[in-house]
Image (spheres, rainbow, N blue to C red):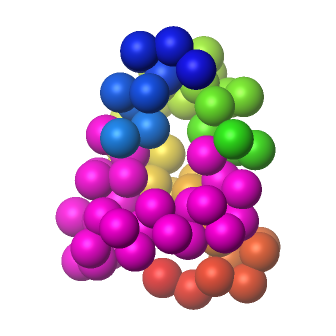
Amino acid sequence: MDKDTFSFIIYMIHACANDWKQNPSEVYKNMKKTNCIMGFLVPNYEILHTQSTKYIIRDINEYFNVRGISI
């Protein structure tokens, strides 16, 4: 994973935590449990990083819902 992708992942963990009023470590734990980082965010970085933060948060929320994680 390159520096830009890593920075994007960290940014999105904190953006989701702020939006969902959760601790970033809890968001990370759920992302790890559902393979969101390596299975969704990293492979789609080139497309996702051009989208708005709110749009990506909604995508991650939907990704979680499909996998049985409720926010």
Q: Nearer the viewer, residue 50 or 68?
A: 68
- The quadrant where residue 47 appears: top right
Q: Is residue 40 magenta?
A: no
Residue under the image location 75 percent in, 44 percent down: 39
Q: Position of residue 69 (x, y in %)?
A: 63, 82
Q: Can residue 19 be seen in the rendering of this structure?
A: no
Q: Is residue 66 visible?
A: yes
Answer with left or right where residue 9 lies relative to residue 44: left
Depicted 29 relative to depicted 60: above or below: below
Task: Tell whether 1 sits left or right of 34.
Answer: left
Report the residue at 49% width, 45% height from top: 56
Residue found at x 41% / y 15%: 4
| Image quadrant in which the N terminus is located | top right
Q: In the image, is 31 to the left or to the right of 8? A: right
Please tell me whether residue 51 is drawn above or below residue 28 in the rendered image.
above
- The front one of 66 and 32 is 32
Residue 9 x, y percent position in the rendering: 44, 38
Residue 33 placement (x, y as % from top left) = 67, 69
Q: Main secondary structure of the magenta part?
A: helix
From what the image shows, is residue 59 above or below residue 11? Answer: below
Region of the chain picked out in magenta, as a range:
11-37
Task: Residue at 35% x, 67% y: name it.
Answer: 25
